[in-house]
Image (cartoon, rainbow, N blue to C red):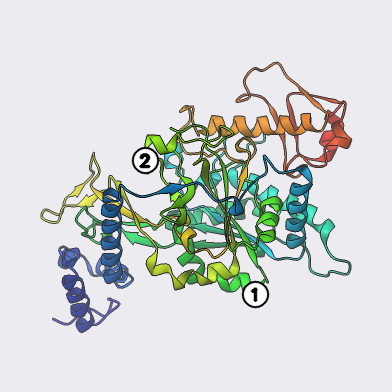
Amino acid sequence: MTISSALPITESELLSLRERFETNGQGHVFNFYQDLPIERQAVFLQQLLNLDVERVNQIYQKAIEGAEAGVLNQDATFEPLPQNVFDSVLKSSPEQIRQWETIGLSQIAQGKVAVILMAGGQGTRLGSAAPKGCYDINLPSKKSLFQLQAERILRVQDIARQYQKPGQVRDCIIPWYIMTSGPTQAPTFDFFKQNNFFGLKEQNVIFFEQGTLPCLTMDGKIILESKDKVAMAPDGNGGIYAAVQNKGIIDSLKERGILYSHCYCVDNCLARVADPVFIGYSVSKGTDCGVKVVSKAAPEEPVGVVCVRDGKYGVVEYSEISQEVSEKREADGSLELRAANIANHFFSTEFLERVPTFAAQLEYHIAKKKIKFVDNETGETVTPKSNSGMKLECFVFDVFPFAQNFSVLEVDRKDEFSPLKNAPGTGVDCPETSRRDIVAQHVRFIEAAGGKVVHDSQDLETLEFELSSWVSYAGEGLTEFVNGKTIHVPAIIETKEDLIRLAI
């Protein structure tokens, strides 16, 4: 039988492809191939051609071995971070913090800093079909997470212009690289386009997709989502390293003269995007890979902690640490293992460029999920009620052991970390707590500048008050407008003119 010219490959190539999948124990993906119309065969074959089946098997094997080693290795040692790689803004002098900030702003002014946003997540758990960054946490201004972050970039650019060298011709620009996933790429770009890139120049907002991997059964078989489609899933936030290589981002960074990148996760509404203090701290330490952390609230808090595991830097999940180890304290009463990971990182461009040299050693982690699948015998679609398979993910922190100059900066949780993870009404890490934490921060900014916010509400989740990052990034520049004055709510402050008008 002659193969149709509508297909992307010849008959001999099709036979070779089938043999390749058979040899690797994945021949079942062709179970329903002959039943498909030519058009669907063509699309399906294209997907299979893009799959490196040998690599999929290798990753599965490595993930299984890693999981088994984790179970068997009960003698792992966990130690707190050594003092030479750990600093805290909570214990540093105002002069030291100002010095770090000045270094950071100087680097930004010289065009050496970019921001990389991990924004592949959807808002499914929030009841939204849109990308999570599009989500409105019900601030008085109704701004999305993307808009909040864009305005912080604009404000830092503005501040950094004061640090430009005399005669500097190039404008102060912080390029924003936004990593999406397959489902979020188009809607994310469309959202930015509809909102005129929130005041940023389009050429300085660069979108790129993270990679994907097939979903697998518990015994490593590729799952068919339908008769003509392999079930695929993003490869975890650690997919950022392969993506910056494969999508030309490293080349773009080098072309722009970027030496350092601040990388963070979209769901943290308090993220200090392009944080000059963190950047300056990392640069001053000669850091190639750095991380920002907050202090773990209690031994039982379910967060990963940055520490030394078996002599190497890494993040250890709370479930891997015994109660005895998790409760150990320093002389000052603080937890020994307290550096809670918040997915907030610093990378030198040189480090990002070096990752491929050790990429084969990076771990893949198993996430068991309910994955819709086609029964290989009957061809019927099954929507499982319990975990039916696994997604394989690598994590952004998996590179820590390979850093040559690792450093960690602890920051204040109430000012820098409020993740949006759960559905409205949950009460923890949800839209209401995100809104509350931003409003509370804005009230603190005014009060720290000598002003007062007057309101009757006992509940910050409903307080109609907001201070745009256009006006103040981290509380700076407010004293001359609010010192000794009062702002009555409701008040939405978008400009300094609003501040002058409302502060009486």
The label number, if any, that marks residue 152 in the structure image: none
The C terminus: image quadrant: top right
Report x, y in % for residue 184.
47, 53
The label number, if any, that marks residue 319 in the structure image: 2
Please state which of residues 18 and 86 is positioned toward the viewer in this rendering.
86
Q: Is residue 230 left or right of residue 341?
A: left
Q: Is residue 476 left or right of residue 344?
A: right
Report x, y in % for residue 170.
79, 69
Please state which of residues 269 and 146 is positioned toward the viewer in this rendering.
269
- Taking the spot 33% from the left edge, 71% from the top edge, the residue there is 50
* Above-or-below relation of 202 to 479: below
Within 10 Å of disc 1 (Cα), the crowding (few <14, some 14-19, many 20+) is few
Task: State how far apart marks 1 and 2 are (Cα).
Answer: 43 Å
Please state which of residues 16 and 323 is positioned toward the viewer in this rendering.
323
Element type at mark 2 = helix
Please state which of residues 288 and 199 is positioned toward the viewer in this rendering.
288
Report x, y in % for residue 60.
27, 61
Q: Which comes before the other along the chain, label 1 or label 2?
A: 1
Element type at mark 1 = helix
Instruction: Work out whether residue 79 can be spotted.
Output: yes
Report the amino acid beneath label 1. Answer: Glu
Instruction: Work out whether residue 45 can be spotted.
Output: no
Q: Is residue 127 left or right of residue 27?
A: right
Tag 1 near tag 2, CB within 8 Å = no
* Above-or-below relation of 138 to 350: above
Q: Which residue is mark 1?
A: 255
Report the amino acid beneath label 2. Answer: Ser
